[in-house]
């Protein structure tokens, strides 16, 4: 029966998180598993007003086919925001609207990767990227992450012996670790790639959710020869509309992306594009983001405080400066998958770390999300998880 299907689908695993979410639909389970924005942050009334307004003012046109590149006023808005935040000279033609940043990864894989081509990932890396890029059947290379970004010496060594087609990165509040590249690392990475054909992909869905410190320029700003940015409204407006984008000044890459997009779905949901744009021009997005950040900072601090109170001292955790996740490292003799089974019995869930590695897995790691639970629930969930860790520790030390 397997001969019916392509090698690329047979070699691509199902999304681990999506499978976990089926289990955690039980309301009794406290779930730190999904990367879900808190629904209380969704601007429901403002979006409802926008939807009514665009139907009244634009009529049937918003229900028609549209251009592949995306709604021009929306691309103009995004371009101006890049200029405002980073001083980048971005124009609408440098932007392609996609069905979330997940489609952006799919399109980039299609236009860049042939079977067996080398693709460089952070270690660990976003599991959605691993799953998407797997469809192109590459050979994965990995570079370890340090608290300030990828290990630069290891990166130089990789580029001495390899020429990966692309390097996929999440520079701000990385998924899954919550780590952020330092300014020095960004400069070094841009310099390293200034004469390389490797496409630097900087996926930045969390960049606007910074709780402390200052926004930092992208690595591509520091001289990378071929640079691509990915962005999304999923974390700052709503994920269900699936509006993301690819930004690149590389005309060759953009031309091929448009062709791939046409072959994939012609264009992204036009109604959602117009509705999102109307919301953006009639509301204060920065004020809305500040509200989200205040909410998430409180939840993050509650989780960190609870971890310090309840977890064993030999368990390490990152302290993210923004975003949605913390990364937990258990003692080397523990397995996060084994912990998951114990925690599930206590009605608390997380994502074991193994799916975030393309090659060499670290079974003693796990990711926890703090954005989709209120402080009281976070505290109770961490308390349950700590009890499971102590149970597992006792099992291994007897």
Image: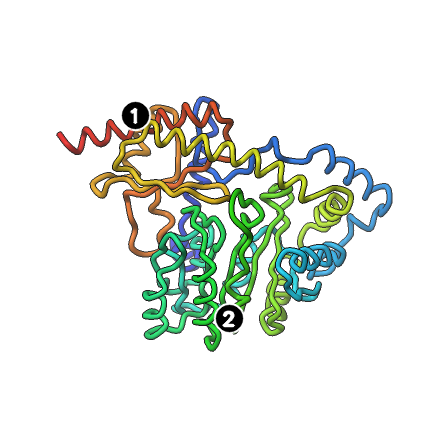
Secondary element at tag 1: helix
Q: Quadrant of the C terminus?
A: top left
* Residue sitting at x 44%, y 22%: 28
Instruction: Name the spot of residue 175 as percent of width and height, x first.
Output: 45, 48
Asked if residue 267 shows in the view, the reply is: no
Q: Which residue is mark 2?
A: 224
**Image disc number at residue 275:** none
Q: Nearer the viewer, residue 148 or 113?
A: 148
Q: Is residue 244 left or right of residue 273?
A: left
Query: From what the image shows, is residue 179 above or below residue 343?
Result: below
84 is higher (above) or lower (below) than 213: below
Circle 2: element type: loop
Q: Nearer the viewer, residue 144 or 33?
A: 144
Question: Is the residue 19 above or below the residue 378 in the image?
Answer: below
Q: CA distance from mark 1 to mark 2?
A: 47 Å
Query: In percent of the image, x 44 and y 34: which residue is there?
Result: 32
Q: Is residue 104 above or below residue 210?
A: below
Q: Which residue in the structure is indicated by mark 1?
A: 387
Rate crowding at label 1 as few (under 14), some (14 to 19) or many (20 or more) other CA atoms within 10 Å: some
- In the displayed structure image, the side of residue 360 where residue 245 appears, left or right: right
Front position among marks 1 and 2: 2
- Camera-nearest residue between 165 and 325: 325
Residue 185 relative to residue 78: left or right: left
Quarter of the view holding residue 253: bottom right
Q: Can the viewer see residue 163 in this picture?
A: yes
Near-viewer residue (27 or 367): 367
Q: Residue furthest left?
A: 398
**Where's residue 341, x and y in %?**
31, 31
Q: Residue at x 54, y 53 (%)?
A: 204
């Amino acid at each position: 029966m397997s001969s019916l299907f392509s090698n690329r689908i047979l070699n691509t695993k199902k999304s681990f998180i999506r499978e976990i979410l089926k289990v955690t639909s039980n309301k009794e389970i406290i779930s730190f598993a999904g990367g879900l924005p808190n629904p209380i942050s969704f601007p429901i009334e403002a979006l409802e007003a926008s939807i009514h307004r665009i139907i009244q003012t634009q009529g049937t046109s918003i229900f028609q086919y549209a251009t592949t590149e995306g709604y021009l006023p929306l691309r103009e808005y995004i371009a101006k925001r890049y200029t405002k935040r980073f001083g980048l000279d971005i124009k609408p033609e440098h932007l392609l609207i996609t069905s979330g940043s997940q489609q952006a990864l799919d399109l980039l894989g299609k236009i860049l990767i042939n079977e067996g081509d080398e693709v460089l990932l952070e270690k660990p890396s976003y599991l959605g990227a691993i799953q998407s890029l797997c469809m192109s059947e590459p050979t994965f290379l990995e570079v370890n992450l340090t608290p300030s970004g990828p290990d630069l010496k290891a990166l130089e060594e990789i580029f001495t012996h390899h020429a990966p087609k692309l390097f996929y990165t999440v520079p701000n509040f990385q998924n899954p670790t919550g780590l952020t590249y330092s300014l020095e690392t960004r400069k070094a990475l841009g310099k390293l790639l200034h004469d390389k054909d490797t496409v630097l992909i900087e996926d930045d869905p969390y960049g606007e959710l910074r709780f402390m410190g200052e926004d930092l320029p992208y690595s591509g700003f520091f001289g990378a020869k071929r640079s691509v940015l990915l962005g999304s409204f999923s974390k700052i407006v709503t994920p269900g509309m699936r509006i993301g984008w690819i930004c690149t000044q590389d005309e060759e890459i953009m031309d091929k992306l448009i062709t791939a997009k046409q072959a994939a779905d012609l264009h992204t949901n036009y109604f959602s594009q117009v509705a999102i744009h109307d919301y953006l021009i009639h509301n204060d997005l920065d004020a809305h983001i500040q509200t989200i950040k205040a909410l998430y900072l409180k939840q993050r601090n509650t989780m960190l405080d609870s971890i310090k109170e309840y977890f064993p001292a030999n368990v390490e955790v990152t302290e993210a400066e923004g975003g949605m996740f913390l990364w937990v490292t258990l003692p080397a003799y523990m397995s996060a998958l084994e912990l998951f089974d114990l925690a599930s019995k206590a009605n608390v869930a997380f994502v074991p770390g193994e799916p975030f590695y393309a090659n060499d897995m670290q079974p003693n790691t796990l990711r926890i999300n703090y954005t989709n639970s209120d402080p009281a629930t976070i505290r109770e969930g961490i308390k349950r998880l700590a009890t499971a860790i102590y149970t597992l520790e006792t099992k291994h030390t007897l």
